[in-house]
Every structure is written in C-alpha cells, then in structure tokens.
Image (cartoon, grey):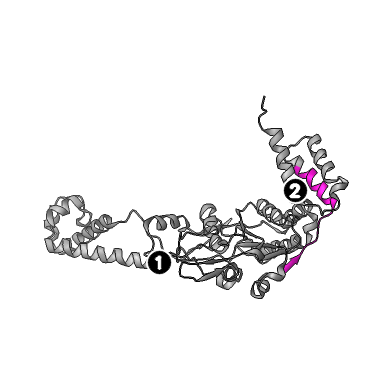
Amino acid sequence: MSTIPFIEARFFNPAEGRIELETRLMRHLRKLRCKRIPPDLLAPPDAVDAPDKVSDADLMGIVRFSDDDEARIKRRVKRLMECRKAASGLEHLKRDDRERLEVLKDGARLISLRNEHQADELAAALHEDMPWMAPATEVVWHAMRRSVREGWPGLRVPPLLLDGPPGIGKSHWARRLGALLSTSTAVIEATGENASFGIVGSQRGWGGSHPGRLIETVLQSRIANPVMVVDEVEKAGRATSTSGQAFGLAEALLPLLEPLTAKRWSCPYYQVKFDMSWVIWVLTSNDCRLLPEPLLSRSPPIRLRHLTLAELLAFVRREGAKRDLSETSIEAICEILSHPSLQQHRPSLRVAARMLQRAADLEQGPTLH
C-alpha cells in the first residue's frame, strides 16, 4: 500500500502546547541576552565548559526576566497559537471532531495491485463466482490492469452503474469485489428519504446533523479507495430541511463521481476538503431510465441479464462449500430452487442467499432440547 495526503488541513504536534512554547521562548531569550554578558562572568577562567554550553539552571541565576518580559512572551505565544489554529483549517470544529480527523494527519492508504497478473487472478475469481455479471467484471478487470500499467499509486476504478433485474446479486457482486481487493466496503440503501445525508452527511443546522457513511468509512479504515455501494439508486427520495430546502441523492453524488471535483470534495459536516477521487463507487438500479442525465453521463449503465437456474445452482454449491455446509443441506437447497412450482419465477440470488444463511444457522447454531 502507498499513502497519499487525504485531508486539506495541518496538524501540529500536540506536545507543543502553550506551556512548551513559553518555555522555549524563554530559553531562547535567555541565551540571546547571555551573548551580551562578558565571558568571564558566565564562567570562571578555569572552567571546562565553554560559555555557550552553560546549563539552563546556571543561566537562570545570571539572566532574570522582568514582568514585562514574561508578558511579552505570553502575548507572543498567544499569537502563535492563534496563527496555528487558523493555519490548521480546523478552527471551526469542536475538539472532539478535530481529534476524530487527526487519524488522517499522515494521510490515507491506497489499495494497489502488484502487477497485471494479480489483476487477472482477481478478475478470474470474481467471474468464477458470478459469471452472469461478466460485463461489470470486465470493466473492473480493465481498470485494474490500467492502474498497474499507468503506474498509479493505487487502484482507480471508474464509477459503475449496474443496471439489471432485481435478485441477480448486484450488491453481492460489489461486496465480493471489496473482499477480493481487501478494502473496506459500505452498502447504503438508497430507498430511505435521507439517503443523500446517509452518504455524504448533513451540515450543522440541519436536524440531527452528522457525518456521512463515506467519510466514516475512510476514518475507520484509513483507506482512501473503499468500495461504496449505493443500492437501488433510482428509488432515492429527497431530504428536506426544517427551512424547506430539498437535497437529493443525485445532487450529492455528482461531485463525488467527477474526479476533478472529488479530489477536493468538501464534507458538509466537517466543512473540510478531502481527496475522494480514489473511492470505488458501485451504484445499482433496476431501471436506470429513472435516473437524471448528469448522473448517467458520469456513470454509464452496465446492462446486466437474469441469471439462469444452472448458474444459480452452481452459486449455491460454491457458497455452501465456503460456509462448510453439509452436502445434504446444499442439495436440499438446490432441489427446492429446482422445483417445477418455482419455474414460473425468475431465479433469485437473494432467495438463495437467505436459504444458505438459514441452513448455516441451523447447522452451526445450538440445538434446543
């Protein structure tokens, strides 16, 4: 992993507070005044130490400060502290918020790939798990190879909009991508009316203002290119402030999907700029025609098809083996999904995943007597 500057702010050494600065200035002033004192008064002729090596304790006995000297030093330190606070870019924040952002003072890490061969292996593993998602996997595969070929410090993937029927595992594919890349992943359901606030956060002054999932994900992992999944983005509502101002999800996402504006994205809550240009965005939709054109231009839809029954059964067997399910449980699930009464409905990965989880709970959970 490489590390990049992530926050437009300056962090000063907390060990250099007001008292430490006053002590340093007093020591400096004492040494300056000592230069005006004849050398024979600083040390006797037979002294071993040179005059410039006289200890602070000895200097305190020779050079004393007046009340005016101490007042001048205190004023200078106060001014220095004010300048530091202004230069930090965090002076408007509460102490708790400043301390929260301090984890980013040394930057954030970037997930990267060693070579194009690793990109091929990751893409192959992703395709083996979910072959019906091939169009999306191919886009990510080329992006991984391009990141290595161009010598970028980390993996950069363009915004993805996975458009297809429900139940084919679009969000599951995104989580699997994050797991293969060993990066943090956050999934946000866009169906809530406050989805935009859930992602980017809300400004102070709005009811229940808070930081969004985006910056929270980076703060927790200290990784600058997490996978951010926005599920069913076309169903997002609009948040409304107490003053009647409306704020939609599309408006919140547009600056984050454009690399130039994302590089200096201003967080509504912290009101500080962050480099969000490396975030891997995966948006999912069942009908992309309901999305605004500016969003579609930044993330062209990747059309996906229904999965077949054979692909669903292969997925169940692979996932069942990963969960250490018994062969009996796996085949029972496959038999249920293959039943003729279900053939009138399209195979659903969501239903299969629930059945796998239920089987795992039954096999691994305690038995009631």
- For residue 180: magenta? no
Near-viewer residue (340 or 74): 340
Residue 107 in the image: state x and y as whole percent.
50, 59
For the point 20% across and 49% down, the residue is 48
Residue 43 seen in the current view:
no
Please rate how many residues cluster around mark 2, counting C-alpha atoms within 10 Å: few if below 14, some from 14 to 19, many from 20: few
Determine which residue is flagged by label 2.
351
Q: Which mark is residue 89?
A: 1
Magenta residues, as a range?
300-319
Three-letter residue code for mark 2:
Val
Please rate how many residues cluster around mark 1, counting C-alpha atoms within 10 Å: few if below 14, some from 14 to 19, many from 20: some
Toward which corner of the image does residue 334 lie, by quadrant? top right
Near-viewer residue (106 or 114): 106
Residue 59 in the image: state x and y as whole percent.
16, 54
Mark 2: which secondary structure? helix
Of tags 1 and 2, the one toward the viewer is: 2
Three-letter residue code for mark 1:
Gly
Left or right, residue 112 beside residue 340: left
For the point 69% across and 70% down, the residue is 290
From the viewer's perspective, is residue 354 above or below residue 367? Answer: below
